[in-house]
């Protein structure tokens, strides 16, 4: 086993600045060549602590921005005009891309469509709640009203 300090987040292993014990081959063949880790030596503990502090500061900043966006979006209703049949069934569907474009147009906020947690496309007229996850700790609903165009 080899002790390493992660230089970036590695899934199922740890986050930037964490000290981990990994197999020698995994470190030599994957982590070191890709620049994701450095060998842990006697003086590396201070550098690892700095990486962790930087990560925590960035995480707190990102969370604060996400909460600000959440407060402004929760209060709004996003209207999306779509063509529909007489029973209210849409010709087509409303996808995350449509919702992200409508949020950018109506609220002036750019949201990555992959942050919208829509389980399946919206296929009916009416009001729908779409969960949005901007940060691992910040999840909120956006009210989307699909209206007849």
Image (spheres, rainbow, N blue to C red):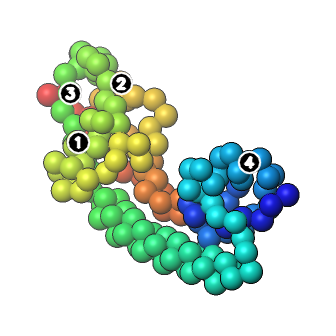
Nearer to us of marks 3 and 1 is 1
Q: Residue at x 69, y 82 (%)?
A: 43
Nearer to us of marks 1 and 4 is 4
Whether residue 67 appears in this view of the structure is no
SS of the residue under disc 4: helix
Q: How many marks?
A: 4
Up-down relation of residue 51 to residue 123 (above or below): below
N-terminal-most mark, 1 or 4? 4
Q: Which mark is residue 123?
A: 2
Q: Pick the residue in front: 108 or 123.
A: 108
Q: Pick the residue in front: 47 or 86.
A: 47
Which picture quadrant has residue 19? bottom right
SS of the residue under disc 2: strand
N-terminal-most mark, 3 or 4? 4
Q: Which mark is residue 101?
A: 1
Q: Pick the residue in front: 13 or 96.
A: 13
Check disc 4 and report the residue beneath it. 26
Up-down relation of residue 51 to residue 30 (above or below): below
Whether the residues at callouts 2 and 3 have beta carbons within 8 Å, the answer is no
Spatial CA span between label 1 and label 4: 42 Å
Spatial CA span between label 3 and label 1: 14 Å
- Locate residue 144, reporting x and y percent: 31, 43
Nearer to us of marks 2 and 4 is 4
N-terminal-most mark, 2 or 3? 3
Check disc 3 and report the residue beneath it. 82
N-terminal-most mark, 3 or 1? 3
């Amino acid at each position: 086993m080899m002790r390493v300090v992660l230089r970036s987040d590695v899934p199922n292993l740890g986050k930037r600045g964490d000290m981990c014990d990994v197999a020698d081959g995994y470190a030599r063949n994957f982590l070191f060549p890709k620049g994701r880790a450095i060998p842990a030596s006697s003086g590396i503990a201070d550098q690892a602590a700095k990486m962790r502090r930087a990560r925590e500061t960035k995480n707190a900043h990102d969370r604060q921005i996400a909460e600000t966006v959440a407060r402004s979006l929760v209060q709004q209703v996003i209207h999306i005009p779509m063509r529909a049949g007489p029973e209210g069934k849409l010709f087509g569907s409303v996808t995350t891309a449509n919702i992200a474009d409508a949020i950018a147009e109506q609220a002036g906020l750019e949201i990555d469509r992959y942050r919208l947690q829509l389980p399946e496309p919206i296929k009916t007229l009416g009001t729908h709640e779409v969960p949005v996850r901007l940060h691992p700790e910040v999840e909120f609903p956006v009210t989307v009203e699909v209206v007849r165009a």
